[in-house]
Image (spheres, rainbow, N blue to C red):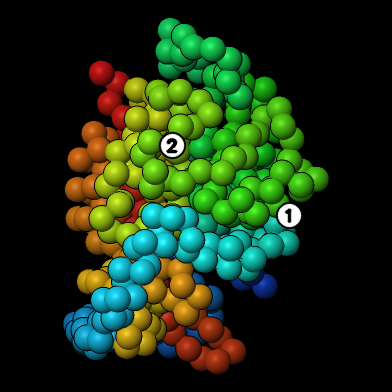
Amino acid sequence: MNVIWRSYICNIRLRKVPFRCQSGNHPVAPLGSRILTDPAKVFEHNMWDHMQWSEEEAAAARKKVEENSAVRVEQEEQVDQKAKEKMGELPWHLAETNATNCFSRVPEEKEQYEKSSGSLDGQSKEESGGLNLNSKEQSKGLLKTDLFPGSGATFRILEVGCGAGNSVFPILNTLQNTPEFFLYCCDFAPGAVELIKSHSSYRAAPCSAFVHDVCDEGSPYPFPDGSLDVVLLVFVLSSLHPDRMQGAVNRLSKLLKPGGMLLFRDHGRYDMTQLRFKKGHCLSENFYVRGDGTRAYFFTKGEVHHMFCKAGLDVKQNLVDHRLQVNRKKQVKMHRVWVQGKFQKPLH
């Protein structure tokens, strides 16, 4: 995966186009350009972009969701889940355990987002909505506070829900020769943060990992409001209870500098993972609990637009990423749906 990541970065820098990594003997295709025009060739690649569902497929997906949400989790269990969430007792350690020792690979969804987003490296100022790693203009007169981790940096990134560091270490590796850069990363699970700190690639100077509950609006961050250039919120928001999502987004919005960007990617409505839930796992509409106790919400583009605009951010990108994932060995086709967005804090 390190070789793949370096290859990707080189392609971006040279051609300023996000590239898909080569698989087998097939030529590399620009990300988002692999379109299935001949259904007979569907099993020639592992993934196809911009897939449009037929009326029959869309109807089947809606029917499946109606079926698996018909039987809800018992109300007593839902009340218990809410209480555990407030007390910090939900089983996030299970997700943390699953991620242990996975530094060598980036999970597919996050990897695809980072490659298609391009807001951290390799894009022009115009393409990334005004962000510039080498620009000090956005920092002038902004932070007149006591020293804090990364206070000397002019470009600061926060990854929310960093887990075992599958995104942290590629970012550090990519920007290791950029002295004005600083990365913050936080997670709800203390074990995940300790795992990152114990890794050989963790360097205290350009990175600060800390435990944080994004739902706790009163919990302080180790840096002041208005100090971040980028916030990464990738496959995190869907794990929160719907009643707490807006508060979390509002709080993250306050952390951004004027002109700062929040990069978002998460599960979309009728994604394969939503359709696979069995009856009795639905907590509320489009909100499910997995067998390990962790949860997942499936967003629409409109819901995402409303939430981030309500937090005072401007929409720079908000799209539904439809793809067809293929298991060529088993001859299985799987529809994937993700929502991806870039939301910018107004300059004034």
Residue 105 seen in the figure: yes
| Residue 78 locus on image (x, y percent) | 31, 71
Tell me the distance, in whole angstroms, between the alpha carbons under discs 1 and 2.
39 Å
Helix, strand or loop for disc 1: helix
| Residue 172 locus on image (x, y percent) | 66, 39
Helix, strand or loop for disc 2: loop
Q: Amino acid at mark 2?
A: Ser
120 or 309, which is in the foreground? 309
The residue that label 1 is drawn on is 3
Residue 27 seen in the figure: no
- The quadrant of the picture occupied by the N terminus is bottom right
Identify which residue is drawn at 73% across, 54% down: 3
Determine the residue located farthest toward the right in the rendered image: 200
314 or 308, which is in the foreground? 308
| Residue 122 locus on image (x, y percent) | 54, 36
340 or 202, which is in the foreground? 202
Q: Residues within 10 Å of mark 2 (few under 14, many from 20)?
A: few
Q: Amino acid at mark 1?
A: Val
The residue that label 2 is drawn on is 219
- The quadrant of the picture occupied by the C terminus is top left
Residue 142, compared with residue 313, is above or below; it is: above
Determine the residue located farthest toward the bottom in the rendered image: 330
